[in-house]
Image: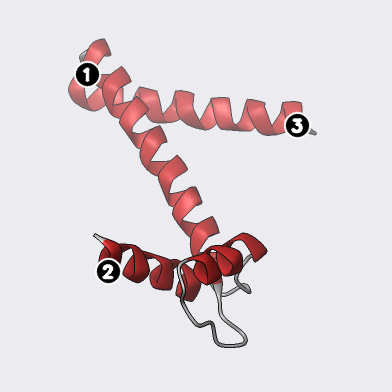
Amino acid sequence: MESKSFEATAERYAALYDKIMAKVRDERVARTILSETAKDQRMQVIRDEREAQNGQPATTRQLEYLKTLGVKVKPGLTKKEASGLIDEALEKEE
């Protein structure tokens, strides 16, 4: 199954490279554009995953760190909220 997924991805990238190459007609430029496009796609996946996790409950590590920073924590704190509280507490320490 993983092999088919890899093959499909490779085919998509090859087709994209061909389209880019048809427009720019320069191998170096086409490779660079393809590379940047792949990075953009990976970053979007990471952003989507992070956004999906932000509504989840704060982690034990976040809660412990907030306690260490002297921040009072409300019940039901989310990962995103905890992250914001940590940032605020650290800014106050500076």
- Amino acid at the residue labelled 2: Lys
Residue at image mark 3: 2
Colour scheme in the image?
secondary structure
Using residue 23 as the reference point, say whether residue 4 is left or right of it. Answer: right
Q: Which of the numbered marks, if any, corresponds to residue 29? A: 1
| Quarter of the figure that contains the C terminus | bottom left
User: What x and y, as percent, mark residue 36?
Assistant: 32, 31
Q: Residue at x 74, y 26 (%)?
A: 3
User: What x and y, as percent, mark residue 20?
Assistant: 29, 27
- Amino acid at the residue labelled 1: Val
Instruction: Give the mark nearer the N terminus: 2 vs 1.
Output: 1
Q: CA distance from mark 2 to mark 3?
A: 48 Å
- Disc 2: CA contacts within 10 A as few (<14), some (14-19) or many (>=20): few
Q: Residue at x 35, y 35 (%)?
A: 37
Q: Which of the numbered marks, if any, corresponds to residue 92? A: 2
Task: Please tell me which residue lies in front, 55 or 19.
Answer: 55
| Quarter of the figure that contains the N terminus | top right
- Disc 3: CA contacts within 10 A as few (<14), some (14-19) or many (>=20): few
Q: Which of the numbered marks, if any, corresponds to residue 20? A: none
